[in-house]
Amino acid sequence: MDFAQKVRRAIGMAEQINTLAYAQQEEIQERWSELTGQEVDETFHLIPPVYTDHGVNIRVGRNVFVNQGCRFNDVGGIEIDDDVMLGPDVSLITSGHPLDPARRRTGITSAPIRIGRNVWIGASAMVLQG
């Protein structure tokens, strides 16, 4: 699967999650597991909508809470440890473009994001690559 196909897949799967009500946590967990390719723990809670560009590079621990409007740009990989809470509209951005204007449209830079145990990231925070 090429880059564009991966992006289309992830956006489509996020759209499916976004049609679900918060009360449908079991189905949200199932769809999230399908999106990420990793079984998610029953203590995972997510309030749709959610956005991602790949999905397969996201790993979440136990007792993780994702509030509405969060964005996971996960090309570089996102790891979220146990007992983490993400406030509404948090953005985890692992990719970007080279700073050199001559290379900006031809390449992507990426580095992972790792969120440690018991971290709370407040509303509208943006965490960048590396």
Image (cartoon, helix red, strand yellow):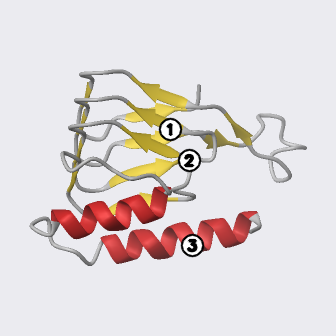
Q: Position of residue 124 (x, y in %)?
A: 30, 41
Q: Which residue is mark 3?
A: 9
Q: Is residue 129 above or below residue 24?
A: above
> How many numbered badges does the structure rendering display?
3
Q: Is residue 8 left or right of residue 87?
A: right
Q: Which residue is mark 1?
A: 78
Q: Position of residue 35 (x, y in %)?
A: 46, 63
Residue at 46%, 49% in the rendered image: 72
Contact check, label 1 and label 2, Cβ < 8 Å: yes
In the depicted view, which residue is nearer to us: 105 or 23?
23
Instruction: Determine the CA span between mark 3 and mark 2.
Output: 13 Å
Residue type for callout 1: Ile
Residue type for callout 3: Arg
Q: Position of residue 33 (x, y in %)?
A: 39, 59
Q: Is residue 8 left or right of residue 60?
A: right
* Label disc, if present, on residue 130 of the rendered structure: none
Residue at 56%, 47% in the rendered image: 57
* Label disc, if present, on residue 57 of the rendered structure: 2
In the depicted view, which residue is nearer to us: 40 or 91?
40
Instruction: Determine the CA span between mark 1 and mark 2.
Output: 6 Å
Instruction: Determine the CA span between mark 1 and mark 3.
Output: 18 Å
Residue type for callout 2: Asn
In the depicted view, which residue is nearer to us: 127 or 48?
48
